[in-house]
Image: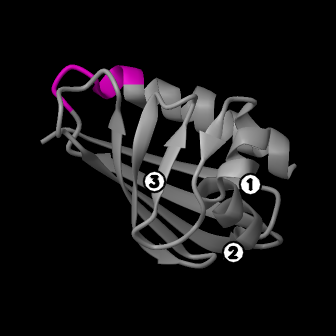
Amino acid sequence: MSTIHQEVSFACAPRVVYEAIVDGRKFAAATGAPASGDGVEGGAFACFGGHITGRHVELVPDTRVIQAWRAKTWPAGVYSIVRFELAAEGTGTKLVFDHAGFPDGTGDHLAQGWHSNYWENLAKLVG
């Protein structure tokens, strides 16, 4: 199985990064693209105008987000698992990210997309 592992640091508290990931309004503010959903375990979310959809499988405030996650171009019923682990790093946050279970041939595109669509936009929002 192919996986993506990335680590990134943000100049803010873990709570700020956590909320930007799980709160649809805050995610939309970070990316400038339509997003919906709220940060409740089991709750559905959509981002980038519905191109990405899924459910929050596990939420540990300020610490961990695990999502069943899919792109709308994938075959019906195909979901991957994304895991965001957050830890205080001085006055900032270290995010350790893992993505598994995506369709063959999509890994390079996804890996680049996490940087350009998620980390760069979250860094602009949170400082």
Measured as percent of width and height from the top left, residue 28 is found at 71, 40
| Element at label 3 | strand
Q: Is residue 116 above or below residue 81?
A: above
Q: Seen in the image, is 40 located left or right of residue 44?
A: right
Determine the residue positioned at 60% across, 62% down. 38
Q: Which residue is mark 2?
A: 88
Confirm or deny contact between disc 2 and disc 1 (CB under 8 A): no
Q: Which residue corresponds to the image point at 83% horizontal and 71% vertical from the top-left?
A: 91
Q: Which residues are magenta?
A: 103-109
The amino acid sitting under disc 3 is Phe
Q: Which SS class for mark 2?
A: strand
Disc 1 target residue:
10
The residue wearing badge 3 is 97
Check if residue 13 falls in the magenta segment.
no
Which one is earlier in the sequence, the residue at label 2 or at label 1? Answer: 1
The picture places residue 97, in percent across and down from the top left corner, at: 45, 53
Q: Amino acid at mark 2?
A: Ala
Which disc is residue 53 wearing?
A: none
Quadrant assignment, res 52: top left
Which mark sits nearer the N-terminus, 2 or 3?
2
